[in-house]
């Protein structure tokens, strides 16, 4: 069988399959299942600095019925927020995952303050994360930032984190950016080893 080994942001992966940040990557046991199924790396469920996001909404799934006359249709809506853990417990899980799996573990953080970005990044590196995803993205856009402000904020975050850690950093960009290629080139100049959308 041919080798599927590849290199991603300086990490050697046995396969090019990287499990994205989600509920399936929150715990070491789940990461082990991903490894056993052929994943080459895992991105842990994102740790948010804002405590309000650290809840597990109930119910998590909901059926939305659509009234279209004679047609009976529905949509299954799934709602899941960030990791329910705080930074200490999240760092413990990074360390536990590194002892449990033999594939790279990528921690994922989303912060609202400069000090948050710096301290969370340091903490994840100290816990043993192989790389760090900077979750600067919201899939639904932002009502807080507009245009150039989003651009400048992302660049500032990359600059702050690059000063703090030596492990590879991956910048998660918003799909709402008007010129993602230009942003990719700019974060690369500041030391981001890769980008994801």
Image (cartoon, helix red, strand yellow):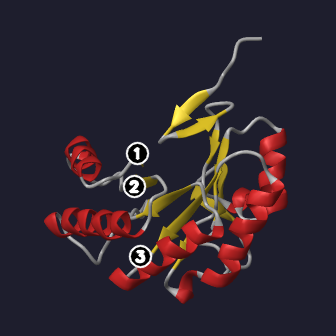
The residue sitting at 39% across, 64% down in the picture is: 136
Is residue 98 depicted above or below 102 in this figure?
Answer: below
Residue 139 occupies quadrant: bottom left
Q: Secondary structure at mark 2?
A: strand
Of 82 and 80, the residue lying toward us: 82
- Which residue is identified by label 2? 171
Residue 146 occupies quadrant: bottom left
Q: Residues within 10 Å of mark 2 (few under 14, many from 20)?
A: many
State the mark number for residue 194. 1
Of 73 and 85, the residue lying toward us: 85
The residue sitting at 35% across, 52% down in the picture is: 192
State which quarter of the image contains the N terminus: top right
Q: Secondary structure at mark 3?
A: helix
Pointers 2 and 1 in contact (C-beta within 8 Å): yes
Q: CA distance from mark 2 to mark 3?
A: 13 Å
Q: CA distance from mark 1 to mark 3?
A: 18 Å
Query: Would you say 133 lies left or right of 25 here?
Result: left
Is residue 114 depicted above or below 74 in this figure?
Answer: below
State the mark number for residue 86. none
Query: Would you say 112 lies left or right of 189 here?
Result: right
Q: Position of residue 10 (x, y in %)?
A: 50, 40
Q: Secondary structure at mark 1?
A: strand
The residue sitting at 82% across, 51% down in the picture is: 32
Task: Kindly give the residue lying farthest to the bottom in the view shown.
Answer: 51
- Which residue is identified by label 3? 117
Q: CA distance from mark 2 to mark 1?
A: 6 Å
Count of numbered circles in the view = 3
Q: Is residue 146 visible?
A: yes
Q: Residues within 10 Å of mark 3 (few under 14, many from 20)?
A: many
Q: Position of residue 11 (x, y in %)?
A: 56, 41
């Amino acid at each position: 069988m041919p080798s599927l080994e590849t290199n991603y942001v300086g990490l050697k992966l046995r396969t090019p399959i990287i499990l994205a940040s989600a509920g399936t990557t929150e715990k070491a046991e789940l990461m082990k299942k991903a490894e056993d199924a052929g994943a080459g790396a895992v991105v842990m469920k994102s740790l948010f600095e804002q405590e309000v996001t650290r809840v597990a909404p109930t119910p998590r799934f909901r059926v939305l019925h659509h009234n279209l006359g004679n047609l009976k249709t529905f949509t299954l809506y799934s709602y899941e927020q960030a990791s329910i853990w705080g930074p200490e417990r999240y760092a413990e899980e990074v360390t536990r995952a590194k002892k449990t799996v033999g594939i790279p573990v990528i921690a994922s953080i989303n912060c609202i303050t400069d000090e948050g970005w710096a301290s969370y990044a340091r903490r994840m590196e100290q816990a043993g994360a192989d790389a760090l995803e900077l979750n600067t993205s919201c899939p639904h856009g932002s009502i807080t930032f507009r245009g150039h402000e989003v651009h400048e904020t992302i660049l500032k975050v990359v600059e702050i984190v690059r000063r703090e850690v030596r492990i590879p950093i991956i910048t998660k960009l918003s799909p709402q950016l008007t010129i993602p290629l230009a942003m990719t080139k700019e974060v690369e100049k500041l030391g981001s080893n890769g980008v994801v959308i």
